[in-house]
Structure formats: C-alpha cells, structure tokens
C-alpha cells in the first residue's frame, strides 16, 4: 500500500538543517512520498500535535522562503508534497512560489483553506509545471462535489476521514468505509485516507477500500520523541500490507 508520512518543516532540534536527514530517513524506510507542512500561526485544520510542532518550527525561525531554499538543496527519489495555508504563499507571491518550487523535489500542493472555486489563483502558474494541486474530499462532500473534485485530478486524492482537525485517537463515522469505497470508484488516481491514522491495523483496514494512508500526528509526535525505530517499523509494516 502507499504510505505518506507528514512532517512539519523546521520541527527538529537543528531546525531546517535537519530536514534533509529526516526526508532521507523516511524515504529509506519505505515512504511513498512525504508531506511537508509549512508552519503557520493560525492552523485551522491542525490538531494539537501538529499545532505544537508548528509552534516549535516558528520558534526555530522557520519561514516559507527558508523551507523552499532548503528544499532546493535536497535530492530524493520520492516526491514531496507541500501542505500550506494560503496566507504564507500569498505573502511570498504565488507566481514566485510556484517558480521557486520547480527547482525542488516538490510535486504536489495541499492547500486546506483554498476551495476548488478559488484554485484559479494558482492554476495558471501550475499549468506549465509538473506540480499538481491535491484535492481534499471530506465526509460532508456531496456526491456532485466528489465528482467535481476527482475529475481531472492528478497525483492522488486526499480523503479526509473525520470531520474536524487532525489527530490520533479519532472515532470514525459509520459511513466512512462506504464513503472511501465510492471515492475509489470515482477516482482515476490513487485515493489516500488521512486524519487520525496511527496504527498498522487502521492502515490495513483502510487498504481494503483505498490505495494508502497519510500519517501525520503519529509521525510528528514520534519524531519529536525520538521514536525512530517505531516509525521505521510502521513504514516497513505498511509496505507489506
């Protein structure tokens, strides 16, 4: 199965100097891609673990420009995906942001506060690149909306598994499996389930109806705690599902 760990850029004892090593560690242990969060002062979709990681990253002086500068020095065989709120990108300059990303391993963007109706602010600049916008499809999305979001999608579909913010220990709705199965039927690209995934058992259950999982809070907390052997075992185990 596909497994994409999420990390917060700059949430490391060495700040962004530790980003290349963390990416290499995750890639070597079987990450299909890596989602890299950009810290922001008002992270409306982030649960407490990722919010605290963002606070630590900001305290380390992490900015979007510094993240991009660092990514331009990194080589990896797997794609990277940036997860950011639109405000830092808007301040950076959307056209410059996309242009600067072209010299990095970034192949996708996840923008949780940019609905499909507002994507036109980015799509003209992305059109000539191999960087794609990854759609987020929620449990509350109507069938019509789901079809709209998956039509023409590239990369993968981010299937949000809960209503609310990220975090481990979430309770899943009774209709989640049917929702994910329908998305998989609609989509021509891989569907990955994210929000609340923290165990191989969950990953195995999700893999019955989707192509893989995105693992955020669990990875972020384990990295912060220094539990790298546990992370490696999780990634290796997920690859065997």
Image (spheres, rainbow, N blue to C red):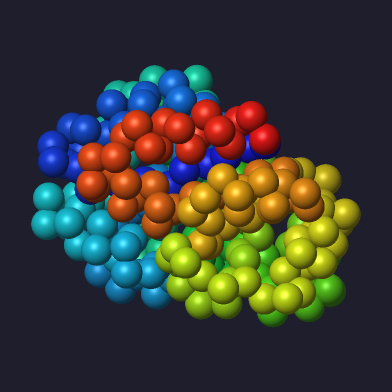
Taking 204 as reference, is 102 above or below it?
A: above
Q: Is residue 170 left or right of residue 231?
A: right
| Front residue of 17 and 132 | 17
Res 188 → quadrant:
top right
**Residue 111: percent from left, percent from top:** 50, 60
**Residue 140: percent from left, percent from top:** 69, 79
**Residue 125: percent from left, percent from top:** 54, 47
Res 71 → quadrant:
top left
| Front residue of 59 and 172 | 172
Taking 56 as reference, is 178 above or below it?
A: below
Residue 6: in sight, yes or no? Answer: yes
The quadrant of the picture occupied by the C terminus is: top right
Tell me the residue at 60%/49% (across/down). 201
Tell me the residue at 76%/44% (across/down). 189
Q: Is residue 53 left or right of residue 79?
A: left
Res 13 → quadrant:
top left
Task: Specify the farthest residue to the front.
Answer: 201
């Amino acid at each position: 199965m596909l497994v994409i760990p999420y990390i917060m850029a700059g949430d490391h004892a060495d700040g962004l100097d530790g980003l290349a090593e963390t990416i290499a560690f995750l890639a070597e242990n079987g990450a299909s891609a890596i989602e890299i969060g950009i810290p922001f002062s008002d992270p409306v979709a982030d649960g407490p673990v990722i919010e605290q990681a963002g606070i630590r990253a900001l305290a380390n002086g992490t900015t979007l420009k510094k993240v991009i500068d660092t990514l331009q020095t990194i080589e990896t065989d797997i794609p990277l995906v940036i997860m950011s709120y639109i405000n830092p990108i808007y301040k950076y300059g959307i056209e410059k942001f996309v242009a600067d990303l072209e010299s990095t391993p970034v192949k996708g963007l996840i923008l949780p506060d940019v609905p499909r109706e507002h994507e036109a602010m980015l799509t003209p600049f992305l059109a000539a690149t191999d960087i794609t916008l990854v759609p987020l499809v929620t449990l509350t999305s109507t069938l019509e909306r789901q079809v709209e979001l998956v039509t023409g999608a590239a990369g993968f579909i981010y299937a949000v598994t809960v209503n609310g913010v990220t975090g481990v220990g979430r309770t899943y709705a009774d209709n989640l499996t049917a929702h994910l199965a329908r998305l998989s039927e609609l989509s021509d690209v891989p569907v990955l389930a994210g929000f609340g995934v923290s165990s191989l058992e969950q990953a195995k259950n999700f893999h019955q109806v989707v192509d893989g999982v995105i693992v955020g809070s669990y990875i972020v907390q384990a990295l912060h705690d220094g539990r790298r052997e546990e992370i490696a075992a999780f990634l290796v185990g997920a690859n065997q599902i």
